[in-house]
Amino acid sequence: MRYGSHMATTTERTHDPIHRVSMAFERDGDRLWVFTWLGHGGHLPEHFHPTLEERWEVLEGVADVKVAGRRRTLTADDGPVPVARGVRHELRNTSGSQAYLRAEVTPPGRLQEFLTESAKAAQEGLYTARNLPRGLRGAAWVSDFALRFRDETVMCSPPPALQRALLPVAARLTRRYRA
């Protein structure tokens, strides 16, 4: 089924000012639709999902996608791009104008919670565009957040092996700084 003109209508937009992206969500049975507006320079940093599968497609505009190390430019004519579990991927908009995309996520897991909480932390300035914490409060949030969602979403910066080693220690050391 093709949803080329389908617009998200069931939730308000969540805005992440660090990555220049806004999202809206729609649940449909055992899947989650993530509607994404990438502003010029917008970027969803490289990450992977150990337990979730995605199918990304551009509905309007142009976006660059990197899946498993391979980059390509997508338009609405290209149709969906599947992203299997455990495959690193990222999205970027360098087109000069906004791009509107949609991802089908199965199973939905807690991706909506992850993206909403991440956007709120971005609004509060708790981390940088490279996903590194700002200050002790940021370190407390990043370590707790990454540990809670590590079974579903893993950022690739800093490297996952370094995260596995440092996050539990950082979470313990920064516990008192959590808001």
Image: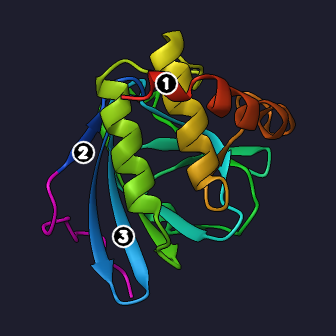
Q: Residue at label 1?
A: 176
Q: In which quarter of the image is residue 19?
A: top left
Q: Residue at label 2?
A: 14
**In which quadrant is the N terminus drawn?**
bottom left
Q: Three-letter amino acid code at disc 1? A: Arg
> Is residue 129 visible in the rendered structure shown here?
no
**In which quadrant is the C terminus drawn?**
top left
- Residue at 46% across / 61% down in the picture? 111
Q: What is the x, y in percent for residue 173?
A: 65, 23
Q: Which of 38 and 108 is in front in this view?
A: 108
**Between marks 1 and 2 in the image, the one whose residue lies nearer the viewer:** 1
- Residue at 47% across / 27% down in the picture? 94
* Color style of the picture: rainbow
Q: Residue at label 3?
A: 33
Whether residue 10 is in magenta: the answer is: yes
**Between marks 1 and 3 in the image, the one whose residue lies nearer the viewer:** 1
Q: Quadrant of residue 102?
A: bottom left
